[in-house]
Amino acid sequence: MHDIYKRKMAVSIRKSSGNNPTNATPKTKSPMREKIVQMYDVLLKGEPPSTSSFGETFWSEFFLLKPKINHFENELCKLNHEQVASARINLNTLFEQSLINLTEEHHIRVVYALQTLCGLLRGAYRKQSGSGIDLVNLLMGFEVAEKRMSELVNHINDFLMGDEPASLKDLCLKLLLIIATGLENVSQNMLLEFIMTNSLLFESLMHLLTNTESRNSHGKNAVLLLTLLVQYRKYDSTNPYIVKLSLLDDELSLHGYGQVITTSLGAYNQSYEASLSDQPHSGWFSSITSMVGNMFVSDETAVRPDQLRACNAALLALYEAVHLNRYFSIFMTVLYTF
């Protein structure tokens, strides 16, 4: 009887232990998704934002939340044709709302609106290259595309010409560079057609080059952007940026343009000279034989293509300035020695 009692007690203890929540294996909770990510889901699923769980405050809250640009781009690129068609109206609205927030006095809203546009444009270009979708219709809609792009360029002009923080101007230039480099063939980039109709951007870029402080901060991107804009259908039609660059005779602007190019090429030359300084020096005859020997140098010790590509933009900018502007050659000859 005593053994039977002990067995019953053991069974009872095991049962009670199994039912005890303190001994149960805790369930792993899924991590809470950030609010901005949830909002992206609403937009990309094609749900009307105002009828979502966020309600009527969707857009008023959206641009107060830090963007997760990489996440948005990647999710946009995952959409198939049907999902893109469902999300198109929301993406058009996102572009419009971003423009509206560029006029806000709240600095955070302006910055987040620009960052959102960067992500939207970059994601749309990636999606176009993979599926052949119509970029203009996806971003803005045909009917209002010219109006929207005009508003965007005007806002950016105001930021670049105004007394704005350097970080904001840098973000504006990055946005324009995303547009200018969206397609491998710059002449097939339809968004650049809208920028061609507003050549006031040329004055904004020159304004950045005339001031030493702004040139040091933004000069490289400004010259790169202008060089890309000059390439747009340069042989097929009248490009206003080609015309303006060819007529440029302002000394400060030419000085700034030349300073950016010489700084970029000078840095590359210094890097190359530093690599040569590691080699042993000897007389003139040895130098000649070394030069001849370098004609047959192996790929391992030759200047790598990526090193040359690093200064391609500066070389192209130099070529376009010399080719298009007669004053630039004279100015560079007088003031600079390479």
Image: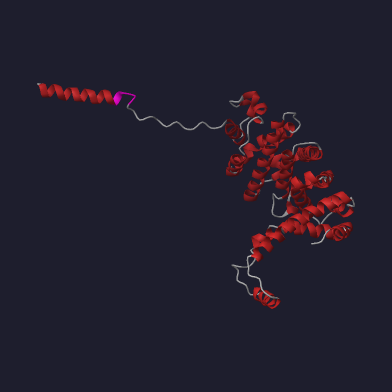
- Residue 324: quarter of image: bottom right
> Does 216 lie within the magenta span?
no
Residue at the (84%, 52%) spot, across then down: 255
Which quarter of the rendering shows the N terminus? Answer: top left
Residue beneath the point at 74% across and 41% down: 172
Across and down, in percent, residue 8 comes to 17, 23
The region drawn magenta spans 18-22
Quarter of the image with the C terminus in it: bottom right
Whether residue 14 appears in this view of the structure is: yes
* Residue nearest the observer in this picture, 132 or 218: 218
Name the residue nearer the viewer: 157 or 301.
301
Residue 194 seen in this snapshot:
no
Q: Residue at x 66, y 71 (%)?
A: 281
Residue 311: % across, % down: 71, 58
Residue 303 lies, with reference to residue 183, above or below; the image says below
Location of residue 305 by image quarter: bottom right
In the displayed structure, 257 sits above or below 49; it is below
Across and down, in percent, residue 26 comes to: 38, 29
